[in-house]
Image (cartoon, rainbow, N blue to C red):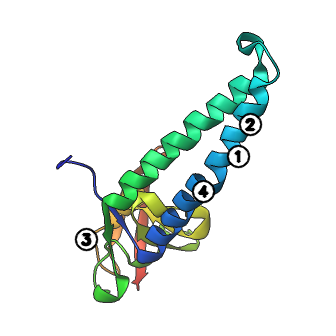
Amino acid sequence: MANEKQFPMTAAGKQKLEDELDFLKTIKRKEVVERIKVARDFGDLSENAEYDSAKEDQAFVEGRISTLESMIRNAVIINANDLSNDTVRLGTTVTFVEVPDGDKESYTIVGSAEADPLEGRISNDSPIAKSMIGRTTGERVKVLTPGGEMEIEIVSIT
């Protein structure tokens, strides 16, 4: 277990995972167990779709609980207030434009556990974040994406 993957995240990101874990353990797990009990009462389990569905849900919930416990246990809290804003790193918010004529976009670089691009948080493991980490304002960076190569210019780091 000494080589378990570390999960960088903000304190808020860790709290969100802890809340999800609590919900799964105290509410969702009980709901699934109850569904399994009810489905057993339908009779023959070999042709019981409700039972099969409940068992699949149980496997998903238990797998997610295990994943969340590992992520929380191996969380490394990143405090953006302790970081300087001179270079892009985990916890900073980066504004950039696609060269030559793209719109401004801003994203906060976070660990994979709390990434949510629709909420403006991208994983440090994403191609764009990997390309920007260690760079400074004004630098142009080539980014290899699944859709091809693009060039961006870092406008600001906060």
The label nearer to you, 2 versus 3, is 2
Q: How many marks?
A: 4
> What is the CA distance from the residue labelled 3 to the residue labelled 1?
46 Å
Task: Assess whether mark 1 and mark 2 are in contact (beta carbons under 8 angstroms).
Answer: yes
Please give the name of the residue rendered at 35% of the width and 88% of the height, measured from the top-left corner.
81
Quadrant of the image occupied by residue 27:
bottom right
Q: Amino acid at mark 1?
A: Glu
Establish if 60 lies above or below 156.
Answer: above
- The residue labelled by disc 2 is 35
> What is the CA distance from the residue labelled 2 to the residue labelled 1?
6 Å
Establish if 53 lies above or below 17.
Answer: above
Q: Decide if residue 83 is on the left or right side of residue 65.
A: left
- The residue labelled by disc 1 is 31
Badge 3 crowding class, 10 Å Cα cut-off, few under 14, some 14 to 19, many 20 or more, is few
Badge 2 crowding class, 10 Å Cα cut-off, few under 14, some 14 to 19, many 20 or more, is some
Q: Earlier in the sequence, mark 1 or mark 4?
A: 4
> What is the CA distance from the residue labelled 2 to the residue labelled 4?
15 Å
Image spot of residue 141 (x, y percent) = 34, 65
Q: Secondary structure at mark 3?
A: loop
The label nearer to you, 3 versus 1, is 1
Please give the name of the residue rendered at 48% of the width and 75% of the height, measured from the top-left corner.
12
Quadrant of the image occupied by residue 110:
bottom left
Q: Is residue 157 or residue 152 the one in the foreground?
A: 157
Quadrant in which the C terminus is drawn: bottom left
Q: Is residue 155 or residue 111 the one in the foreground?
A: 111
Badge 4 crowding class, 10 Å Cα cut-off, few under 14, some 14 to 19, many 20 or more, is few
